[in-house]
Amino acid sequence: MAHKSNIPIFFTSVQTLSNRFESSAYTMGKLGFEQFSPEDMDFTIKPKQEEIVINKHTASIFIDTGFERMLRNAGIITVVFTGIATECGIESSARDAFNRGFYSVVVSDCVSSPDKNGHERSLENMKNLITIINSKELENIWSGTKKLSSKIQDDSNNIHHEDIGNASKSDVSPNTPPADETDLSP
């Protein structure tokens, strides 16, 4: 869908550091990265030649990767997220994008997790802050038949929707093996 709409795709890959250089928060945490070797990260979905591959060492695509600089240099303001794991890389990156002033969009039927409860909780957590749509809605947006809107809360705590336009050639789509994040910028 992104390729047909000429949306750039960023393919992200989690690269673990050797124990000597890895954060003790990660090695003592519950993320489980320590159980994977680079060989284990051979995913079914592979990046195409024209896709940009970003190696990340944390759950967020924004930390120490240059991703934000690439988005800003390209004038991209909306990032659409797909991939795994919803409650880890997707939610961390979508919240990080939002906190950095980007419109975050999560495609609900294009994200997943081995932890079904974590996946569902994450989508529920994000829906009040981040735009959650399904792939059919995204397809309609990228084809120009629908506009994307974002929930905006005003000073009186009233929520309304603000039109943030259609996707254009300057949009981005990152995804992690199998698909991590995606972007569609107006």
Image (tube, helix red, strand yellow):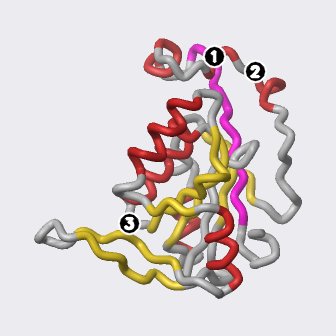
Q: Is residue 11 above or below residue 26?
A: below
Say the numbered circle drawn on residue 101: 3
Please tell me which residue lies in front, 157 or 102.
157
Please tell me how crowded label 3 is: few (under 14), some (14-19), or many (20+) other residues with Cα within 10 Å: few
Disc 2 to disc 3, C-alpha distance: 34 Å
Rendering quarter of residue 66: bottom right
How far across and how far down the image is residue 52, in percent? 74, 59
65 relative position to 104: left or right: right
| Label 3 SS | loop
How far across and how far down the image is residue 119, in percent? 54, 37
- Residue under label 1: 34
Please tell me how crowded label 2 is: few (under 14), some (14-19), or many (20+) other residues with Cα within 10 Å: few
Say the numbered circle drawn on residue 37: 2
Could you tell me the amino acid type at mark 1? Answer: Glu
Could you tell me the amino acid type at mark 3? Answer: Gly
Could you tell me the amino acid type at mark 2? Answer: Ser
* Residue at image coords 66%, 47%: 83
Q: Is residue 166 above or below residue 56?
A: below
Please tell me which residue lies in front, 2 or 76.
2
* Region of the chain picked out in magenta, as a range: 9-20
How far across and how far down the image is residue 113, in percent? 63, 34
